[in-house]
Amino acid sequence: MLDDDARIRVKTGRLAIEKDGQQVGSVPLMKVRTVFIVGRGQVTTDAIATLVQNGVRFVYCTKQGRLKAYVAPAFACDPRLHLSQVENYLDPDRRLALARTIVILKIDAQESYLESRFRHSALDGDLYRSTTRILDDLRERACSSRSIEELRGLEGSATRTYFACLSSLVKQPFTFTGRSKRPPRDPVNAVLSLSYSLSTSLMTSVLYAEGFLPDIGYLHENYARRPALALDLIDPLRPSIDRFVISLFNRGVFREDDFVFEGEDNACHLTLEGSRKYYPRLSRFLFEPEKGGSGKEGSLASSMIREAMRFKNILLKETRQTASASEASGDAVPYQL
């Protein structure tokens, strides 16, 4: 929900969206799994209670995509998982192995996206080959890295190399010369930043629902009020988000006047009209299987759930294996994925 003066309520088994006292849309409750509230839209207490009882999550975000609040069914926390998260974080070898895997998976996903663009003749062959050579080298170095700081440096180098190649994919009238975050300096970076932020907010809600502590991560620094684990697990999914964003520009969804530059830092943002084009497409990208695909991969949200479940199994499995080995031998065993 985007409009600040919109209201969500429940009516006879349907989720109804109202504006200025008139119903402007509705959807059957049984089809609702997550509700994004972007800005200051309102939800009635009855709607929150009914939807939460049916397992629906509410994700409240700023218009820049940052998570403000999260509402979900009670008692989602898993004490075993919380303890395992902390144990794996405090063990230097386990933390390094988890962080290393995240970086390797991200580089693999970056190469996979570039390969798909090359196969569709959207990417120059020489540029593609030179980029993948660098990414391959960085991946190999990540496999043998010995510290979190080294891994972060390799991940940063890979991301800069990847975006330098990606810049050639954006068609006129828009241009993209590389990643700029705070603030975004152009329309492509504005939509990338917003999409990353909203996807991270959704990943945070998935982690809460699966019983994680989203603020205890392994690659990203752990700061107060920062979902470090959500940032970790969204990293390998970012190339999918990049593909979505670039396709919006290349299909002519946006015009130049859908963006505005504001503030002392001249940050680029979507206008209200641009937002009306963006959010319905983002919703389909997040929650609906890709059209024309095999259907096996599902939506980005389902990918997030799969990654969270896989990560949970890894954490709990390693904790059990370490405990069993320590009891048998009295020694700690090395961590392996």
Image (cartoon, rainbow, N blue to C red):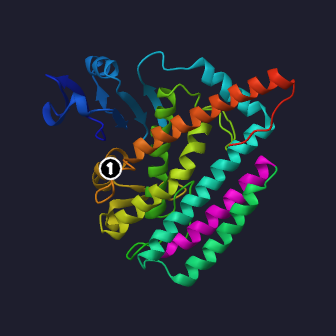
Which quadrant of the view contains residue 63?
A: top left
Q: Quadrant of the C terminus?
A: top right
Q: Which residue is mark 1?
A: 289
Q: Nearer the viewer, residue 36 or 325?
A: 325
Residue 155, horizontal then vertical, whole percent: 67, 57
Q: Is residue 132 left or right of residue 206?
A: right
Q: Residue at x 75, y 24 (%)?
A: 324
Residue located at (49% from left, 53% from top) = 193
Is disc 1 surrounded by few (<14), some (14 to 19) or many (20+) residues within 10 Å? some
Q: Nearer the viewer, residue 6 or 201?
A: 201
How far across and how far down the image is residue 269, in percent? Answer: 42, 55
Q: Which residues are magenta?
A: 147-168
Magenta stretch encompasses residue 298: no
Q: Is residue 47 above or below residue 146?
A: above
Does the image show residue 24? yes
Q: Nearer the viewer, residue 254 or 13?
A: 13
Q: Residue at x 25, y 34 (%)?
A: 31
- State the image quarter where residue 241 is shown: bottom left
Look at the numbered disc 1 and give the secondary structure of its residue.
loop
The answer to if 167 sits in the magenta stretch is: yes
- Whether residue 179 is visible to the viewer of this picture, yes or no, is no
